[in-house]
Image (tube, rainbow, N blue to C red):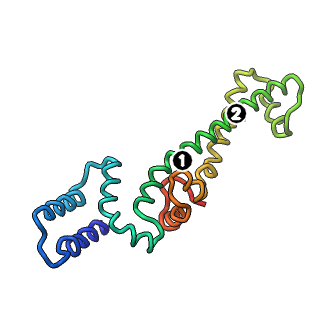
Amino acid sequence: MEIFSQAIFYHETFVITPNGKPPTRLEELQIDTWVNELMVGNSGYPHHLTDLLRALFEKFDGWLLNAVGFTVGDIIAIDAALPLFLGKKVSSHAATVGALGREMFNEFREFRRTQRAHSENHAAFFEKLRTGSNRQARPAISRLHTDFLLGNLGTVFCFTPEQLSAECGVAVERVSGVGRRRKLPHGTLT
């Protein structure tokens, strides 16, 4: 609520009477619309909220850039790119894990014939599965890799400012500035 109060104070102090003159009827209508959007609420669709953020804070881009090292447009671009970027990272990780699972299942079938595995850990795991059928072994191998996938999501959700910058089109130093001042909603900037 504090930001709303500050926005209203700003508009009442500087926008409404920039030269000590009362606002025109059009300016009053614009101010009433801003207050209504801030106090009563807006439609809430993400693109409407983005428009609202831009309308309220783009005027301060020069100050924001000097004071904190990024603009409201930078935050919006990062926020839009982040879920897509992380989705690609998770999909890539899942594809890698899936390929490893298929590879391990093929290794298991070979182990059944030759008693050889790529490592002692694999051999011990395969030995436990050997008495069952391939139909029983496949879910066990799949669960192992699902656990691996889920257990390593922490590394998937970590990324560098350079990686995020390449995804969102915002300069690396601005991405770093956002990361220093704001906890990102999904992931960790390293």
Q: Mark 1 highlights which residue? A: 85
Measured along the vertical axis of the image, is residue 122 above or below residue 115?
A: below
Residue drawn at x 15%, y 79% is 20
Measured along the vertical axis of the image, is residue 32 above or below residue 131?
A: below
For the N terminus, the quadrant is bottom left
What is the number of the mark on residue 99? 2
Residue 94 as seen in the image, left or right of residue 119: left
* Cα–Cα span, label 2 and label 1: 21 Å
Q: Where is residue 8 drawn, in percent x and y?
A: 23, 68
Tell me the SS state at disc 1.
helix
Foreground residue among 127 and 157: 157
N-terminal label among 2 and 1: 1
Mark 2: few/some/many CA within 10 Å (<14, 14-19, 20+): few
Looking at the picture, which amino acid does disc 2 mark? Answer: Ala
For the C terminus, the quadrant is bottom right
Residue drawn at x 64%, y 51% is 155
Measured along the vertical axis of the image, is residue 93 above or below residue 63?
A: above
Residue drawn at x 72%, y 29% is 102
What is the number of the mark on residue 149? none
Measured along the vertical axis of the image, is residue 43 above or below residue 190?
A: above
Residue drawn at x 87%, y 22% is 113
Q: Where is residue 59 drawn, in percent x and y?
A: 33, 66
Foreground residue among 177 and 130: 177
View extreme (bottom): residue: 20
Q: Where is residue 13 drawn, in percent x and y?
A: 21, 75
